Image (cartoon, grey):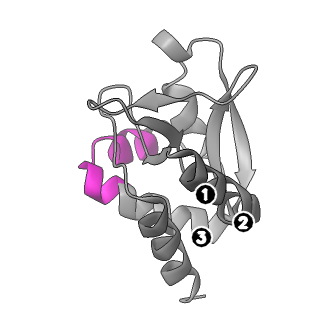
Amino acid sequence: MKLNDKQISAVIALPSKDRYEHFIKVVADWQEAWGLYQDGWALAGTEDGVQVFPLWPAKEYAQLCAENEWAGHEPRAIPLSELTGELLPRLKKDGVLPGVFYTPSNKGVTPSVEELKNAIDAELSNY
């Protein structure tokens, strides 16, 4: 999937809840999510200190956030089967929340692992 600047700007401007819904649809459709990687995956944190694993629906959105503390990180695809079968269970075990669709100016949504997996599964059931 190749996005143009107009699409990127329009989606980035959406409220967090709408970006979350967009993420679910795109990840189910394209069968992959994206993270940022440099000698390990980029992590963030909530205001109360819980670790967060940021995820994006496309390389271009992840690339926008590869700045400041994530400067030097590169977007890396995560196949949907790996996301739901390996990564989400590992995040749950480690007490890390998924962080859906950060932007340079917004931390996105941090659902529980179960909420994210259920939303993806529900969207996949439409296919």
Q: For mark 1, does the 10 Å Cα neighbourhood hold few (<14), some (14 to 19), or many (20 or more) residues?
A: many
Residue 78: % across, % down: 72, 50
Residue closest to the eye, 70 or 112 = 112
Callout 3: few (<14), some (14-19), or many (20+) C-alpha neighbours within 10 Å? Answer: many
Identify the residue shown where x is 34% and y is 43%. 108
Q: Is residue 86 magenta?
A: no
Q: CA distance from mark 3 to mark 1?
A: 15 Å
Q: Quadrant of the C terminus?
A: bottom right
Write down the residue under mark 1. 88
- The quadrant in which residue 112 appears is bottom left
- Residue beneath the point at 43% across and 45% down: 101
Q: Is residue 88 above or below residue 63?
A: below
Based on the displayed image, in which of its 4 quarters is residue 70 positioned? top right
Q: Which residue is mark 3?
A: 28
Label 2 neighbour load within 10 Å: few <14, some 14-19, many 20+: few
Say if the magenta span includes residue 13.
yes
Q: Does any portion of residue 72 appear in the rendered image?
A: yes
The image shows residue 86 at horizontal and vertical percentages of 73, 58
Tell me the kind of residue under disc 2.
Gly
Secondary structure beneath dot 1 equals: helix
Tell me where residue 80 sits by quadrant.
bottom right
Asked whether the beta carbons under mark 2 and mark 1 sit within 8 Å of each other, the answer is yes
The amino acid marked with disc number 3 is Ala
x 56%, y 89%: residue:
125
Q: Which residue is mark 2?
A: 85
The answer to which of 57 and 1 lies nearer the viewer is 57
Magenta-highlighted residues: 6-19
Of the numbered discs 2 and 3, the one sitting upstream in the chain is: 3
